[in-house]
Image (cartoon, rainbow, N blue to C red):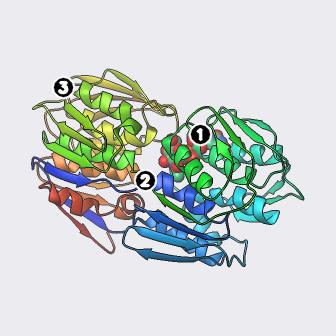
Amino acid sequence: MGKYIIKGGKRLKGEVVVNGSKNAVLPILSASLINSRESVLTNCPDITDVSVTCEILKSLGCTVKRDGKVLTVNSSGISNVLVPKDMAEKMRSSILFLGVLLGKFGSVSINKPGGCAIGKRPVDIHLDALKALGAEISETDTTIECTAKELMGTDIYLPFASVGATENTMLAAVFAKGQTIIHNAAREPEIWALQEYMKTIGVTVRGAGTPTVFISGCKKYSDAEIDIISDRIEAGTYLTAAAMTKGEVFLKNINWTYMCKTLELMTEFGCEIKVQKDSIYLKAPKKTKSLNLIRTGVYPSFATDMQPIIMSLLTTSSGTSIIIEQMFENRFSHADELNKMGAKISAQTRVAIIEGVKQLKGAEVNATDLRAGAALIVAGLGAKGTTIVNNADFVRRGYENIEKNLHGLGAEIKFCDGEN
Ligand code: UD1
């Protein structure tokens, strides 16, 4: 699983070029099956979630080539509609193959997805939306089978603005007869990015970024070339790392408008922030301030994926802060690990109280999921002494070259491959 070894206490200073967004590229890779043609994705991050998705595409009969940051998928040769079990179980976003395969081939069988252990994460909203389009669905404990003679466009009301359910419904609705209107759609920038890709291949779709998305299929598909939007969570991680070490950082290749809430929080911490069109500068104060009460929520509220990372910074901010986790029911596993480093956190299911301490101490800790791992790295950068973050593979699912980028900012961090 590998580990990161961090010698903390170095003030970070310098520049980072933010990579393409994991959560934007994954649904676009599923969408690349739609056109049976070529899709060229630039600014594509080289992370393991992308590699696993590319393996799924290859197993379905697509050709996939990477040249640096450019990924080219050709879906003209799809010969198989079975997503391999081990790959589906590896990552939750494999569920995004459900809608597109159902729409394109009229039937699909897929293993229930895996992914981060941050809660139950059911897929009922996805399945109800596909049923509304006309799918018949049968489930076992481990598999989902969907069939449909013909999908029919309709009004779909999502009971919760689920990101994945919005994307899956958009992908299936391309193949439906007539217009589909998704009400209470998720509004994340990554949904907008999916819409932009779909428009490029010829799909009639509008409304992404608002709660109502309209999809009316496609008359003629085209090849696509699209730049993947930058990763707002990766960007937020580097901002927090700089703040944790009382440092300063200049982020390039980032649209700051995707991360207004994180920037607002950074200002409340006492950081100085300057933004330009594609960049963010942050300079941290000598001591960050606590945040009183913050709640995670759907975009544009405080992103649940930033919650563990922000919690790390709160551990050494002056005063007491409270975090309410509203999105997932099991997303405080990092709190116990931070406590091993001297943090004072009392976490229940949905509420964590963080009492700021003077400084964290290096310790051996375990990443339990992707963002928890990033949070522990951030904590280790600010801690006195050496921190070992085990289970580095979780981090590599979503961060390209995190050790190289942090090293470039002056951190002492190395990645060790192999067994813990
Ligand atoms: C996506 C992101 C993930 C982020 C999350 C919330 C990707 C690949 N992943 O995950 O990084 O943390 O959005 O911003 O984009 N739910 C149900 N039934 C469903 C679907 C969801 O109950 O059918 C619940 C989930 O259990 C969870 C909440 O809704 O509690 C949010 O989930 P959702 O928005 O669907 O997140 P994902 O698409 O899985």
- How far is the residue under mark 1 from the one under mark 3? 40 Å
Q: What residue type is labelled 2?
A: Ser
Q: Which of 263 and 9 is in front in this view?
A: 263
Residue with the most extreme top position: 292
Q: What element carries label 2?
A: loop
Residue 119 appears in the figure: no
The numbered dot on residue 208 is 1
Q: Name the residue under label 2.
A: 21
The kind of residue on which mark 1 rests is: Ala
Residue type marked 3: Ser
Q: Tell me which image quadrant ligand 1 sits in.
A: top right
Query: In the rendered image of this protein, does residue 353 appear above or below residue 244?
Result: above
Q: In terms of sequence position, does the residue under pointer 2 or pointer 3 come before the other?
A: 2
Describe residue 230's horizontal placement relative to residue 298 as left or right. Answer: left
Direction right: furthest residue: 149
Q: Is the residue under label 2 in contact with that under label 1 (CB below 8 Å)?
A: no
Specify the quadrant of the image occupied by residue 191. top right
Which numbered circle lies on residue 318?
3
Residue toward you, 336 or 78: 78
The picture places residue 418, in percent across and down from the top left corner, at: 32, 75
- Which residue corresponds to the image point at 31% horizontal and 25% vertical from the top-left? 321
Quadrant for the N terminus in the image: bottom left
Question: For this view, does 151 lie left or right of residue 169?
Answer: right
Give residue 15's position: percent from left, percent from top. Answer: 18, 52
Q: Residue at x 20, y 46 (%)?
A: 250
Query: What is the secondary structure assignment of the residue under circle 3?
Result: loop
